[in-house]
Image (tube, grey):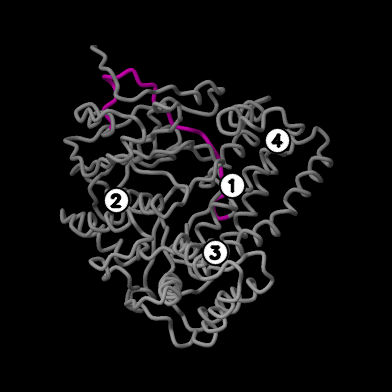
Amino acid sequence: MHTKKSPFNFSSTYLNLPSIFYSLSTPERLDNPELLYLNEDLLKELSIEKEINQLTEILSGYTTNYELKTYAQAYAGHQFGHFNMLGDGRAILLGEHLTANNTRYDLQLKGAGRTNYSRGGDGKATINSMLREYLISEAMHHLNIATSRSLSLFKSNEPIYRDKIYERGILCRVMKSHLRVGTFQFAAYFGKENNLENLLEYTVKRHFPKLIGCENLALSFLEKVMQLQINLVTDWVRVGFIHGVMNTDNVSIIGETFDYGPCAFMNSYNPKTVFSSIDVNGRYSFENQPKILMWNIIKLAESLLPLIDSDTNKAILLAQDLINKYQPTWENNFYKMMSNKLGLDFSAIESKKIVDELLVIMEANKLDYTNTFTALYFYLLEKDFILKVPSVLNEWRDSWEKYIKTTKEGVKNALQKMQKNNPVFIPRNHLVEEAILNATNKNYLLFNKLLEVYKNPYLYQEKYKEFLYRPINEFENNYQTFCGT
């Protein structure tokens, strides 16, 4: 068979790990694939030539005519607190693509068919769920939040049987790495001798080379992952994002957001907000995300104990000393972020009080999380704007404004912080659902418009003012998201 030249520059270092960490798998290609979206901005960033015929073949799952060693990764994970052996059940890695500046990215086909980890599933994905991932992952990228990205989206009329019949989709997900907390759990619980050490050495060499030579490599690695994850979840809270399924297999070692199944954005400020249909106890609610993150980091620490110290008791004490830093670090990050949203000097004692008072009023009055900060920004800017500061905030607002005007940094600096940290447009749940529904009915107008809006989420554009508003209460009260495939 004649082998074609791939438009990608693949070099898969992951396959140098022991074979227990992966299973060679071949994608199940789409019949008569229809290209819905090709992310040309991302193509340029990845230094990939737009060879449309070759890209269509490979990214729709037709890989046998290319010298590609495709594979699924093995991992484990705590799903809603319950430990399971898992793995890529509907995703297959094409390889690690090296850009012109030698940056390495994983390219993975989601919905590519069965692997050894499919556990009875068909390994395929509905076009609905892939449309959601494409839209939200791109929105998160432009919100300046570390995230996976979507390179392409194909669909076919092949029927996918779930709660009803859907069309099939394949999405190409791009990440700097698909290594997760669950990968280390897998090595610790199911690996053979030295597998955990192999994985740590590989991960550090690939992602954290500055840690090489540390006195206690495992402990330094744990500290680095904890900080990256705290930074990430702080950013989620900044924009009102609710991941919805913070299982350990969905926690990236390098601090990227991924897996956009039951995700949603909070409208009215309510810390207990949860939309996922399967999260009946609110384990992954908005307010619980930092708590669950600490729980997940503890699970990583447990997996790393044999490498932290050969004496288990000493290893536990060392890990515990590090975990004890989590809460003060989180609080520091949180109040610094919220201070930036309000244009305050984080180091000032008054800032924390001003933040706390605002959140109490917002929760009690069900104020819109995004629009409240936007209205405050334009109020301080002294510019007439379509969104007004709610009257229940008048007394607080006057105190806040007076404080800013008495500080050395002043109004100009406050406005710069606020503009950078407060998006004007977020993916409102009702708009996302409407866009996906329309797209499945071959009407892509709203979907395309949202993609355009979310490219500049911090910039107010009059022509998109309709996208500022939250849905009616009836929608909000009944809205649910699903771990759809």
The residue nearer to you, when weighing 418 against 323, is 418
Considering depth in this image, is 121 or 151 the residue closer to the camera?
151
| Residue 240 visible at all | no
The residue beneath circle 2 is: 131
Disc 1, SS: helix
- Residue plotted at (55% across, 26% down): 20
- Label 2 to label 4: alpha-carbon separation: 38 Å
Q: Which amino acid does label 4 sit on?
A: Ala
Q: Mark 3 points at which residue?
A: 340
User: Where does label 1 land, which residue?
Assistant: 228
State the separation of the CA atoms marked 1 and 4.
15 Å
Which of the two labelled residues, at mark 1 and mark 4, occupies the earlier sequence position? 4
Pointer 2 or 1: first along the chain: 2
Q: Is mark 3 on a helix, strand or loop?
A: helix
Residue 65 falls inside the magenta stretch: yes
Task: Give the mark nearer the N terminus: 3 vs 2.
Answer: 2
Which region is colored magenta? 61-80
Could you tell which of marks 3 and 1 lies nearer the N-terminus? 1
What is the x, y in percent for residue 240?
Answer: 47, 64
**Which circle, 3 or 4, is nearer the viewer?**
3
Q: Does the CB distance between marks 2 and 4 fall below 8 Å?
A: no
The residues bearing labels 3 and 4 have C-alpha atoms spaced at a distance of: 33 Å
Q: What kind of residue is marked 1?
A: Leu
Secondary element type, mark 4: helix
Q: Mark 4: give few (<14), some (14-19) or many (20+) Cα within 10 Å.
A: many
Identify the residue under disc 4: 218
| Mark pair 3, 1: CA separation | 19 Å
Residue 444 visible in the current orientation: yes
x and y percentages locating residue 51 in the rendered image: 22, 27
Type of amino acid under label 3? Asn
